[in-house]
Image (tube, helix red, strand yellow):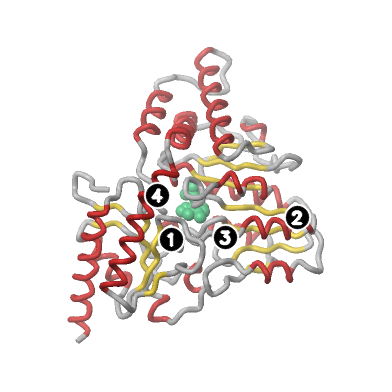
């Protein structure tokens, strides 16, 4: 995406630029003065917008069997799901080793005896390990993401769910990076809780949704106005909800992903041609179309990131949500790679505004950074 200041934005896993349809829906809704809980006509209109949005998003997720609750984002949705799970008794709790911090940290503190599901060498969760780990217990609780935000690797939710459900357990799924990138309706029926975030598909930051399957009794501990059937008190963010609905219903994600995958593949082809020793994570695993997580030997990722930023190219190292710290991310360290690689991964995540031409610009900037770094080291 080229902005007026010539920025090339390739950090779509951190945030997808606001779509025009989402912006329009949001602005239109913002013109309606009122509170969705009010009795008067404006209140009714806002309620209608929220309920239509709920129906649209539910349908896009594949006509969920239970409820969809609007939240301020995925972090809040994850915590509501974890609180709901925490009021029940479990035979054992299993957290994916490379979950986003909003699950990993919160669930680790709520379930101090939890065990962590390891990765196989290709970056997928080791489902055989999980099957063995739950073989002697009943009612396991599993927390697992559908797609990793840093590597783009798609996890096998269906197999994990079959194992968990055969033991009368539950699976709670972070589908933030799956929405719009894989056919999410195929995994929704396998999840007991699933959550998504609007800003990862081009809605504004500050809206998300938690979905829970029929038959689940969620946690109703957040006292207040009782909105969202008592699960999430607080005035709903109707404009952002309308924008979320608009982004999900008006985008042809399939067509977009076809184009984005051509851009990502071209990027990786050019990268490997220029740097045959570069390592790209997840090439042998199922991967979403937009993400390239790579390291070039002898290239320092932080220095490269800063250089690219100065050149007007926005990418990321590690997870943007937790960045500010330069420590190796869990998604990478769980792969037990050579230090020369593991400390130096860069994530480029493309999206709907990127072009093939931008690939050349990014690559030539990486080449310049490489020349500078190797010259300095010589
Ligand atoms: N889960 C994953 C996989 C993410 O990538 C992110 C944000 O990057 C989150 C959860 C948190 O989402 P939110 O910003 O909506 O709280």
Q: CA distance from mark 2 to mark 4?
A: 34 Å
First in sequence, mark 3 or 4: give its number.
3
First in sequence, mark 4 or 1: give its number.
4
At numbered mark 2, what does the secondary structure look like: helix, strand or loop?
Answer: helix
- For this view, does 191 lie left or right of residue 46? right
- Check disc 4 and report the residue beneath it: 258
From the viewer's side, name the closer residue of 307 and 355: 355
Q: What is the x, y in percent for residue 157?
A: 62, 56
- Check disc 1 and report the residue beneath it: 319
First in sequence, mark 2 or 4: give its number.
2
Quadrant showing the C terminus = bottom left
Q: Nearer the viewer, mark 3 or mark 4?
A: 4
Q: Residue at x 63, y 61 (%)?
A: 109
User: Circles 4 and 1: CB distance less than 8 Å?
Assistant: no
User: Which numbered tag is attached to residue 267?
Assistant: none
At numbered mark 1, what does the secondary structure look like: helix, strand or loop?
Answer: loop
| 64 to 137, vertically: above or below | above
Give the image quarter of residue 349. Answer: bottom left
| 226 to 40, vertically: above or below | below
- Check disc 3 and report the residue beneath it: 155
- Check disc 2 and report the residue beneath it: 165
Q: CA distance from mark 3 to mark 1?
A: 18 Å
**Crowdedness of circle 2 by 10 Å Cα count: few (<14), some, many (20+)?**
some
Q: Is mark 1 within 8 Å of ligand 1?
A: yes
First in sequence, mark 3 or 2: give its number.
3
Q: Residue at x 46, y 79 (%)?
A: 337
At numbered mark 3, what does the secondary structure look like: helix, strand or loop?
Answer: loop
């Amino acid at each position: 995406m080229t902005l007026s200041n010539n920025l090339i934005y390739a950090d779509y896993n951190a945030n997808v630029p606001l779509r025009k349809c989402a912006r329009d829906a949001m602005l239109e809704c913002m013109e309606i003065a009122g509170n969705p809980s009010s009795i008067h006509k404006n209140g009714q209109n806002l309620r209608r917008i929220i309920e239509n949005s709920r129906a649209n998003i539910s349908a896009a997720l594949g006509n969920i069997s239970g409820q969809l609750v609007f939240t301020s984002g995925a972090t809040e949705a994850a915590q509501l799901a974890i609180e709901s799970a925490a009021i029940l008794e479990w035979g054992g709790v299993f957290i994916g080793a490379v979950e986003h911090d909003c699950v990993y940290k919160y669930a680790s503190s709520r379930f101090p005896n939890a065990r962590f599901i390891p990765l196989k060498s290709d970056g997928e969760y080791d489902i055989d390990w999980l099957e063995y780990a739950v073989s002697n217990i009943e009612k396991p609780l599993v927390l697992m993401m559908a797609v990793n935000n840093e590597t783009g690797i798609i996890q096998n939710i269906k197999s994990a769910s079959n194992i968990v459900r055969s033991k009368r357990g539950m699976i709670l799924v972070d589908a933030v990076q799956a929405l719009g990138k894989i056919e999410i309706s195929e995994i929704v029926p396998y999840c007991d809780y699933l959550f998504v975030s609007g800003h990862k598909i081009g809605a504004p930051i500050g809206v998300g949704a938690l979905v829970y399957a029929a038959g689940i009794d969620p946690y109703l501990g957040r006292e207040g106005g009782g909105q969202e059937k008592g699960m999430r008190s607080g005035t709903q963010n109707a404009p952002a909800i309308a924008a979320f609905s608009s982004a999900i219903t008006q985008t042809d994600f399939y067509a977009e992903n076809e184009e984005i995958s051509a851009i990502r593949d071209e990027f990786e082809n050019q990268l490997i041609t220029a740097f045959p020793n570069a390592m790209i994570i997840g090439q042998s695993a199922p991967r979403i179309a937009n993400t390239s997580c790579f390291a070039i030997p002898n290239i320092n990722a932080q220095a490269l990131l800063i250089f690219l930023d100065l050149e007007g190219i926005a990418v990321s190292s590690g997870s943007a949500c937790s960045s500010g710290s330069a420590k190796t991310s869990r998604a990478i360290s769980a792969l037990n790679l050579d230090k020369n690689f593991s400390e130096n991964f860069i994530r480029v995540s493309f999206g709907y505004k990127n072009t093939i031409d931008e690939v050349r610009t990014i690559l030539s900037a990486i080449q310049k950074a490489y020349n500078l770094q190797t010259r300095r080291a010589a």
